[in-house]
Image: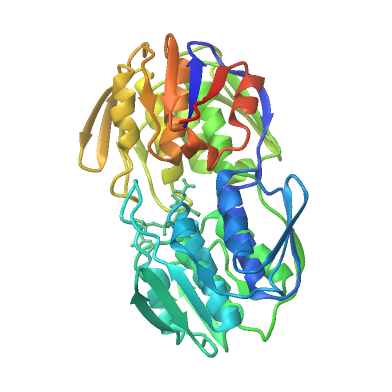
Amino acid sequence: MDKFIIEGNRPLSGEIEASGAKNAALPILCAALLCDEPLRVTRVPRLWDIGTAKKLLAQMGVEVRQPAPDELVVNAAPITTGVAPYELVRTMRASILVLGPLVARRGEAHVSLPGGCAIGARPVNLHLAGLAAMGAEIRLEGGFIHARAARLKGTRIVFDTVTVTGTENLMMAATLAEGETILENAAREPEVADLARCLKRMGARIEGEGSPTIRVRGVKALHGAEHEVLPDRIETGTYLVAGAATRGRVRVNRTDPSLLDAVLVKLQQAGAKLSLGADFVEADMQGRRPRAVNIHTLPYPGFPTDMQAQFMALDCLAEGVGTIRETIFENRFMHAQELLRLGADIRIEGNTAVVTGRERLTAAPIMATDLRASASLVIAALAAEGETFIDRIYHMDRGYEDIEGKLARLGARIKRVSKLL
Ligand code: EPZ
């Protein structure tokens, strides 16, 4: 398993470019299952999860070509099966995003239930309830979701919890359903809107994406298209927080500041001097220690749960006490145990963490437990005194493209050690 060795206590300084958003690329690749013509996707990030998505599509007989490192052409014309096997689904829960397109396009799908996840139970009941409401017959057997429908019928679906992939799955299914589907209490994340933009390029009729009510009028067929994935707002935020935690100055180019409002407010409260442009954001701490901030995660446009762990690392080093309330997932504080090993002062009370900032953290061997927790540990290690070893960094490879390269460009001293066993 690969480890990172990070020599800390060095302010980050410099500029990097954002990659395409993982959480937009994944549903968009699955959207190719909705038609029999090639979907050309550009600005696809080179990530472990994208590799898993490619394998998942290819084992169904779907043609996946990669004419350039960040470009995929997916053509579902040769598809032979609608099965998503357990060995792939258990490594990437987003595999559930093939369900809606397969039922809509082929009338059936056999998708392994995702199983548990480190950060929470993460059931898919709302995905299934929505498909059933559209007329699909759903059967759970042998750890699989077996879904069938001659043709889905449009209907009104009210999500009792805001679900990002639930909204995406049902929006994709609705594009080929008979009649109109209305999704109420829909997720408003920018990645949902990006998927809708791609579906509309494929001929879908969608209104209201990015608002709590999405209307989809079903059409007979969709066609191929081209789509460039929007910039990754969570990657952007992660590097800005790394700059702030190390009292440095980081600028992220080829991004979109308007996707990050709630995060930028918190960076400002922490004392960062922000400069914004149409496609860049810079956060400059001017060498000062950050101030503690209070975080309360909510569905978009509220503060994103995917940025919670990164701000916990910042609060560990900040002046004052910060409280972090996680309302989306029930077990998303696992990074806290590892941060304590670096000397952090964190008290967990239910879904709230109370963090008392320390002037300095000190290096110790730590271990990543999930994707955003690993980002939190890297941020803390970059600020800590001494050399920190972080184990199981495959978690980070799932969602951050060229981590060492981007951090090195910001002046970090980071090395990947690949252990054979
Ligand atoms: C998406 O996961 C993201 N993944 C997650 O990013 C992100 O943390 C999450 O949205 C919240 O923003 C992708 O887009 C691939 P949800 P998703 O369905 O769709 C409950 C990362 O770090 N729920 O919005 O799986 C669920 O348990 C990953 O990149 C149900 O109860 O999350 C959770 O409490 C981690 N029933 C809440 O809703 C359902 O059927 C929000 O989950 C579905 C969800």
Q: Nearer the viewer, residue 113 or 419?
A: 419
Q: Nearer the viewer, residue 142 or 370?
A: 142
- Image coordinates of residue 420 in percent, x first then y, are 50, 29
- Image coordinates of residue 287 in percent, x first then y, are 53, 11
User: In which quadrant will I find the C terminus?
Assistant: top left
Residue 421's place in the image compared with 38, above or below, is: above
Outermost residue on the right side: it is 67
- Image coordinates of residue 137 in percent, x first then y, are 41, 85
Corner quadrant of residue 196: bottom right
Q: Residue at x 57, y 65 (%)?
A: 209
Q: Residue at x 59, y 30 (%)?
A: 403
Residue 341's place in the image compared with 37, above or below, is: above
Corner quadrant of residue 135: bottom left
Q: Is residue 270 visible?
A: no
**Left of 332 or right of it: where is 271?**
right
Give ligand 1's quarter of the image: bottom left
**Left of 64 or right of it: where is 211?**
left
Residue 273's place in the image compared with 259, above or below, is: above
Q: Nearer the viewer, residue 89 or 263?
A: 89
**Left of 349 or right of it: where is 189?**
right
Q: Nearer the viewer, residue 50 or 270?
A: 50
- Image coordinates of residue 280 in percent, x first then y, are 68, 35
Outermost residue on the left side: it is 349
Q: Is residue 123 visible?
A: yes
**Left of 352 or right of it: where is 173?**
right
Q: Residue at x 56, y 19 (%)?
A: 415
